[in-house]
Each structure stands twice: as structure tokens, then as C-alpha cells.
Amino acid sequence: MIYKFYGPPGTGKTYRLISRAKAYVRTGTPLDKIGYFAFTKKAAEEARNRMPAENKKLKYFQTLHSFGYKTLGLDESRVLQPEHYQTFGKRIGVRVKFTDRLNKQEIPYLRSDNPYFKLIQKAENKLIEPVSEYNSGEYDRKVIKKRMLTYIYNNMKEYKKTYQLYDFNDMIRMLTKSNKIPQFKVIFIDEAQDLSPLQWKLFDKLKEHAEDIYLAGDDDQAIYAWAGADVKRFIQEPAIEKTLKFSKRISEVIQSESKVPISRIKGIRKKKEYLPRNYKGKSQYISNLSQVNLLKDRWLILTRTQQTAANIMTELKNKNLYYMFKTDKSYQVKLYKKIKNYLRWCDGEQIEDKETKDILKLTSENQLVKKQWYKFFDKAPIKEKTYILKLMEQGEDLDADARIRVSTIHSIKGGEEDNVILFMHQGSKIQKSIKRSIEKQDEEHRVWYVAITRARNNLYKLKTNNKLTEYPI
């Protein structure tokens, strides 16, 4: 039997799946007969932590590609890494850069800025040839050349074959053709709206190996169409359906705001209503960051693109505000560690010889002497020293995560915060690309829906200098 949970933001999709998994355990289902497949490594870890069992016993609580990797018995050295792409790129004279080099979240979509690799991966996820994807009309032919596309694709296949390397898509393909998939009592798939046709093909294979399957997702949050995700399949998949209606996250005002972008979706959509929590909340436009007090409370600043995120971070640093981008802190962590070690020494603590040597590299002194740390570290970059000093004077706990987080909308999916500043800049390239199809326009509306619904209480919409580049809400 197949069951499907539609869960708008904050309605507890994961909670519902875990509750069902616990129920199967209570009625005698062995842990190794339960498959729980999440979209990211972090989400899979969260699911394991919610189960009343040791992690090592939760054999199949993982991402789909981790499931493929382990089930197929692949060696880590044979998994294609960003470094391989970069090496391959150098060989054929193509630049390849990654926004998440180590893919810490294990998101099964290539985070490269190279348009050719993006197109190739999307085609593979859609189970079509790259040339067919190229001919879809969604691509700027000044940016992507058909002959170069074919050249890169054929050479990449040969490169992988020569060095016996496999990427995430290869693992899924191999798994769909293998006879190694174990038999399950029940399978849970979270964020199912983000599955691509290739991953749905694996789902069809899994159906043959499970008595029950539970799907959970929200078509309104399907923002990976750029990589081949098939939200239509999620909506149309036959199942016993239930919509989770009560949000524990969204305030009344935020819910009202969130209806604007999804009301513009012209393609297929599951109609659903949900109830906000009993809190009014606030939404307002601001012209600059100085209009909110970032020196207190917790904040999430969201941008549509990496470049606007970089601009925001520059402004925050100029204002001497402590923030984080993904897991990276805004100050030089190594310098701060040396400052802390020096202060420990000044307080009479013993420090290691290596720590002493590292400290002395940033001072004109030939030995440790007690001074104000700012003066002692006279070889450290003045701007960075001043920044750290200001943060310390403001009472920021630099050992803890920052109260202010900066993220692109795609990177924060699943996250939330009490106060969200949403930079309304959409970008001319995005505006140009969404004119190519209704599907692209619908995906863009979903992106802004996801952005708005990251706010628990208050939403501050940061205007741009040019209203024409804003997403209208």
C-alpha cells in the first residue's frame, strides 16, 4: 500500500513519518526491514536521531545515493568528487567551480557553476540525452554551444570509464538494474517532491521490494526543477492521501504573505489549505539593514543568488556584525583561536609549544609578553583585528554560532528563524530565464514561497535600488 502525506511548512511531515516508523517497530518490524530515505545527509541524520534506537542499528536511514553506494558495495575511491570534475575540466579546457566543494549536505545534485555540467546532469536526471535537453529551448545558445556540449558529455563518459568512477546518478542507475535491493516491510521517502525521473525509476523498483511505502512532501516547495526534479510525478502518484493542516511554524501574517507566490502557479498543483499557529506576526518592507536592530535577537537573511549574498555579507562586516554563511563564521577562525590561546597564557594557563609558535608568527616580539592582545598581534591584518575586537566589545560569543545567518534560498530549504530578512532582488539573469517556459515561472514562484515560509514570526522585505529587479509581493 502507498500512502502520501502533503505537508506545508511546519506541519510536521518528518514527525509524521517518524511516528509511523516507530509504530512499525512497536508492532514487531525489525529495524533492518525499515527503509527511511531523506533528501540530504542532514535530514537522514535527523531522522536517525529521532528514532529510539542506536544509529548503527538503523541500517537504511540514509539518502538514496548512500543507499545505492552501500548496497552496491562501492569503494569510496571510485565515487566521483568535485576534484575529479576539476581535473577533467583542466584536461579539456573547461572551468569547473563548486559552491559546495565537499558536498557536505550530500545533496544529489551537482553544485557546479558550469552550465554544461548542469545541463548534462539535468538530462540524466530526466532520463533523456543532453542534446534533447539542450533542444528544450530553456538554454541561452550564446552560453551553451551544442558541439561543446556533445564534446564534454562524450569525454566525461570516457573519463569515468577509464578511471572506473561513478557519480550519484550512476549509483541510482546501477541500483535500478541490480538484484541487490533487500526486501523491506516499509519504506519512507521524505521530500518526495524533489525526486527526479531517475530517482522515481528507483522508487518503482523499491515498490517491488516493500509491503508499504509512505511518501511525504509539498509540491509548493519543489524548487529543484532546475536539476530535473519531477513534481508532477509526486502529485500524480496514486496513493492514499492526507494533507497535514496545522503549522507549528508559520504566523498568521506569514501565511497570508505566502499565498501570493503560489497563487501565481499556472501548472499542476495540489490544492491545500493549512492553519497558521495562533500568533499574528509582522511583514513589512525595509529600504536598508539599518532599519532593523541586528544587535539582538536571531536573524536569517535570505537572497536569491550567491552574488547578492556576498554583497549582504560585505555590508554586515562593514557594520561590525557577527554572522555565518552556511557553516562558515564571519571572522578568521584561525586568528581568533590564536588570540584566545594568547589570552589564556596571559591569564596564567599553560599553552603548548606549537600554540606559542603560531602566536609568535603574528607579532614582532620574539617571546610571549603581556600586552593588550590587539597591540601584541601587530602583524595580524588590522582590518580583521579590528573586526574581532568590535565583536568582542559587543559581547558576541564568538565560540557559539552567530545569531545572524546569511543564506541563499535554495541552501536554506528546511530551515527557519523567528526573524527573516528577504532581499527581494531577483536578478536580471533569472528574470530572463523564467520567460522561457511556464514551468520555469512556476518554479520561481515556489522558490519565493519557500523563502517567505522560512519566517516563524516576522518578515522584513528588503527593497532593491531598482524596483524592476524585485520579485513582486
Image (cartoon, helix red, strand yellow):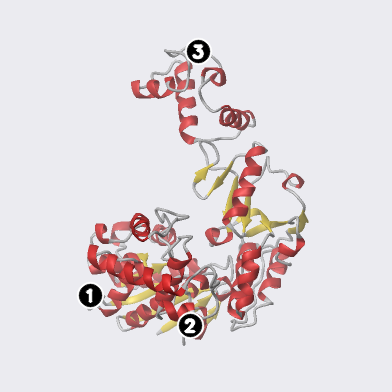
**Residue on which the image places disc 1:** 180
**Residue on which the image places disc 3:** 370
Mark sitting on residue 169: none
Looking at numbered disc 1 in the image, what kind of residue is underneath it? Lys
Horizontal placement of 442 versus 116: left or right? right
SS class, disc 1: loop
On the question of residue 31 being in view, the answer is no
Nearer-N-terminus badge (3/2): 2
| Residue 385 coordinates in the image, percent (x, y) | 57, 28
The answer to whether the residue labelled 1 contacts the one labelled 3, judged by CB atoms less than 8 Å apart, is: no
The picture quadrant where one finds residue 166 is bottom left
SS class, disc 2: helix
Is 53 in front, or is 197? 197
The picture quadrant where one finds residue 469 is bottom right
Looking at numbered disc 2 in the image, what kind of residue is underneath it? Arg
Nearer-N-terminus badge (1/3): 1
Looking at numbered disc 3 in the image, what kind of residue is underneath it? Lys
Graded by Cα atoms within 10 Å as few (under 14), some (14 to 19) or many (20 or more), the crowding at tag 3 reads few
Question: What residue do we see at 39% from left, 75% from top?
Answer: 124
The picture quadrant where one finds residue 54 is bottom left
On the question of residue 25 being in view, the answer is yes
> In the rendered view, would you say 67 is above or below 362?
below
> In the rendered view, would you say 119 is above or below 410?
below
**Residue on which the image places disc 2:** 233
Graded by Cα atoms within 10 Å as few (under 14), some (14 to 19) or many (20 or more), the crowding at tag 1 reads few
